Amino acid sequence: MPAGRLMLAVLVAATVVARAQQPAAPITTARDVPRITQADFRVKLNAKQVLVVDVRDEVAFKSGHIPGAIHVPAKEAAARTSAIRRLAGTRLVVTYCSCAAEQSAAEAGLTLVQHGLPAVAALVGGYPDWIHNGGAAETAASR
């Protein structure tokens, strides 16, 4: 490899490493809460790598939710952070709702992050996309 190309390759590699070592941007608004795609969520759910948190109201939860999800209405996220932390352990906490753009899920996720949970993501498309893409539904009667 010519010296010029070698030098360029070394500079590019150094830049990539430096960027990878930079801390993630702080999560200060609901928009900053990471999102997880339906496809990535399914993989992690099947591998039991997530704690699934339904942040919708009780009526919505009872009428159908992602199997295994726990119910924590968005307005209760702060008060239930310790319990969620215990249940999650080292797993990613995935919040979901039925809102366009995951508003309630992201707001609940922000609350959880602000109360010390290190790994939280909102499910892109929430429950409606889960069902639309063939996801199973669990109801209060089926538990």
Image (tube, rainbow, N blue to C red):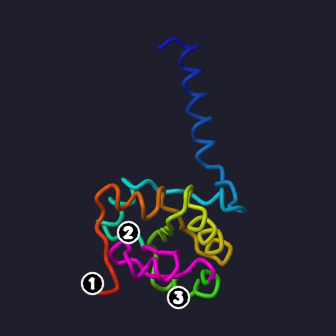
Amino acid type shown at disc 1: Ser
Q: Earlier in the sequence, mark 3 or mark 2?
A: 2
The verdict on residue 68 being magenta is: yes
Residue plotted at (62% across, 42% down): 19
Q: Earlier in the sequence, mark 3 or mark 1?
A: 3
Q: Looking at the picture, tell me which residue is in the foreground, 8 or 143.
A: 143
Residue 49 sits in which quadrant?
Answer: bottom left
Q: Specify whether 60 is left or right of 119.
A: left
Residue designated by label 2: 49
Q: Residue 28's spot in the image, x, y percent? A: 72, 62
The residue mark sitting in front, 3 or 1, is 1
Residue plotted at (52% across, 63% down): 122
- The residue range painted magenta reads 51-75
Query: Marks 3 and 2: CB-CB under 8 Å?
Result: no
Tag on residue 142?
Answer: 1
Amino acid type shown at disc 2: Gln
Amino acid type shown at disc 3: Ala
The residue mark sitting in front, 1 or 2, is 1
Q: Earlier in the sequence, mark 1 or mark 2?
A: 2
The verdict on residue 19 being magenta is: no
